[in-house]
């Protein structure tokens, strides 16, 4: 039997009525001749509530108990979805992560999937089960305890099942009807993309486009899973939503596929650091140990053996970053005159595989920003991306200007 994976996010299972609507979609695919693995999130808001309860109970919580609590939201929706399907006379049952078993590392709260043996579900499919409803986001660690995969992890569950079972497709049902050229709340002319390459989606996902968990896109790219993002609130035809696929499957595309932003960034500069071998390691080692997610890094040219070192990180990690470098300074591992943190910056990026073969894209970006009088503070580039750090108050303006200048409202 051909097999589909259908994943329903929190807003798509937020009420019993919505679960019924989602179940009808599943029923239609069964009628089309598919066996279906349904992956469900918790009802929207539920996971936040559970996380809140854990934090309130124990600020320095045991991560294993965090997982025990936080994984429960998916257990509820999996059972309800299976019941709803049964009421519609579709043979279905629910599975928790450990029952499959979806095996993970024991990094509680951020576990990685290690293996998904297919025999249990396959046996049931062979016995006439049409739908396996699997609780997303959770698994069992090599310590034998329930684990969770990090926020947004049900996307990754879905892609991992699609890869393990060789599914024809992995459909991610969500509250938006696809992946857009940028956030439609900022740019009204933002356009839904019919297709986007894995690598582009990966950049957009990690840049803060919150449609898919980054890890799920990595997995889809590695295992060539056809991933479709579509709305659970609309009637979808064959071509609905956005297909995230291999570059070869995209015929025409704009040089720049999308504009992404990340609002709450900070820029931290260590002024007058001794410029010697090992200095970057001495600074960024402690930052990484402190769990600071350093993004951009710039080292200035040095004068008389001293240099300035600038990096960016999320605004709410600045305090931790300051403490980490201060500790390294106190221990005599590094030496700097001053630390300056600018907490009022945002990152804006353009992404597109077309940049590989087109020169001058970065220059065009800088010109567009300069035409708006926006000052660029830090620049980084990769093969398919250019990112700039700018004052947060100009973020929306920058996104709009870039969307315009690269003509993203029109398809190529
Ligand atoms: N319920 C989990 C969360 O809110 C996992 C998911 O929905 O993907 O992060
Ligand atoms: Mg999500």
Image (spheres, rainbow, N blue to C red):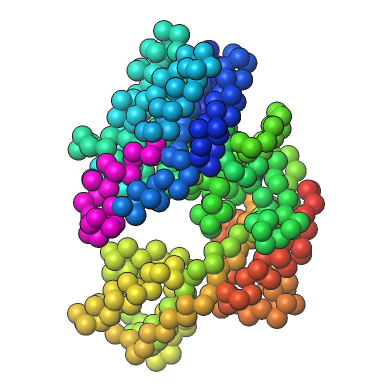
Q: Position of residue 165 (x, y in %)?
A: 45, 23
Q: Position of residue 112 (x, y in %)?
A: 34, 42
* Nearest the eye: 19 or 371: 19
Q: Is residue 381 visible?
A: no
Quadrant of the rendered image holding ligand 1: top left
At horizontal 43% and vertical 81% (from top left) the residue drawn is 341
* Nearest the eye: 346 or 379: 346
User: Could you tell whether 38 is left or right of 117 in the image?
Assistant: right
User: Could you tell whether 278 is left or right of 346 in the image?
Assistant: left
At horizontal 29% and vertical 29% (from top left) the residue drawn is 98
Q: Is residue 135 visible?
A: yes
Q: Quadrant of residue 198?
A: top right
Is 221 situated above or below 131? below
At horizontal 48% and vertical 48% (from top left) the residue drawn is 214
Count the numbered circles shown.
0
Q: Which residues are magenta?
A: 54-74
Q: Quadrant of residue 325?
A: bottom left
Q: Find out whether residue 14 is within the magenta segment.
A: no
Q: Position of residue 306 (x, y in %)?
A: 38, 87
* Nearest the eye: 357 or 56: 56
- Prevalent SS, magenta region: helix
User: Could you tell whether 273 is left or right of 4 in the image?
Assistant: left
């Amino acid at each position: 039997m051909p097999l589909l994976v259908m994943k329903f996010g929190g807003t798509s299972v937020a009420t019993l009525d919505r679960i019924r609507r989602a179940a009808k979609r599943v029923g239609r695919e069964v009628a089309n001749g598919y066996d279906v693995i349904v992956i469900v999130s918790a009802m929207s808001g539920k996971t936040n509530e559970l996380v809140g309860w854990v934090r309130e109970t124990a600020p320095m919580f045991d991560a294993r108990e965090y997982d025990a609590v936080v994984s429960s939201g998916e257990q509820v929706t999996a059972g309800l979805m299976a019941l709803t399907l049964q009421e519609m006379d579709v043979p279905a049952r629910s599975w928790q992560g450990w029952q499959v078993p979806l095996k993970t590392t024991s990094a509680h709260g951020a576990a990685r999937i290690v293996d998904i043996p297919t025999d249990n579900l396959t046996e049931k499919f062979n016995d006439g089960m049409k739908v396996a409803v699997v609780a997303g986001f959770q698994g069992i660690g090599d310590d034998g305890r329930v684990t969770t995969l990090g926020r947004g992890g049900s996307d990754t569950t879905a892609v991992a099942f699609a890869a393990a079972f060789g599914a024809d497709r992995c459909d991610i049902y969500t509250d938006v009807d696809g992946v857009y050229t940028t956030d439609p709340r900022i740019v009204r002319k933002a356009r839904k993309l019919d297709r986007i390459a894995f690598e582009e989606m990966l950049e957009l996902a990690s840049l803060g486009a919150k449609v898919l968990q980054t890890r799920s896109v990595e997995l889809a790219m590695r295992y060539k899973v056809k991933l479709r993002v579509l709305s659970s609130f609309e009637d979808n035809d064959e071509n609905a939503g956005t297909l995230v696929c291999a570059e070869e499957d995209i015929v025409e595309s704009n040089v720049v596929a999308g504009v992404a932003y990340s609002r709450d960034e900070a820029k931290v500069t260590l002024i007058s650091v001794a410029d010697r071998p090992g200095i970057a390691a001495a600074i960024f080692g402690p930052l990484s140990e402190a769990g600071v997610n350093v993004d951009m890094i710039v080292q200035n040219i040095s004068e008389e053996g001293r240099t300035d070192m600038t990096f960016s990180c999320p605004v709410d990690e600045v305090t931790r970053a300051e403490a980490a470098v201060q500790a390294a300074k106190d221990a005599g591992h590094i030496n700097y005159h001053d630390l300056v943190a600018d907490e009022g910056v945002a990152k804006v990026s353009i992404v597109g595989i077309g940049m590989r073969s087109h020169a001058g894209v970065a220059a065009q970006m800088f010109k567009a920003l300069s035409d708006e009088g926006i000052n660029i503070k830090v620049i980084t580039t990769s093969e398919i991306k250019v990112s700039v750090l700018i004052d947060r108050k100009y973020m929306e303006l920058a996104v709009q200007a870039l969307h315009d200048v690269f003509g993203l409202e029109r398809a190529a």
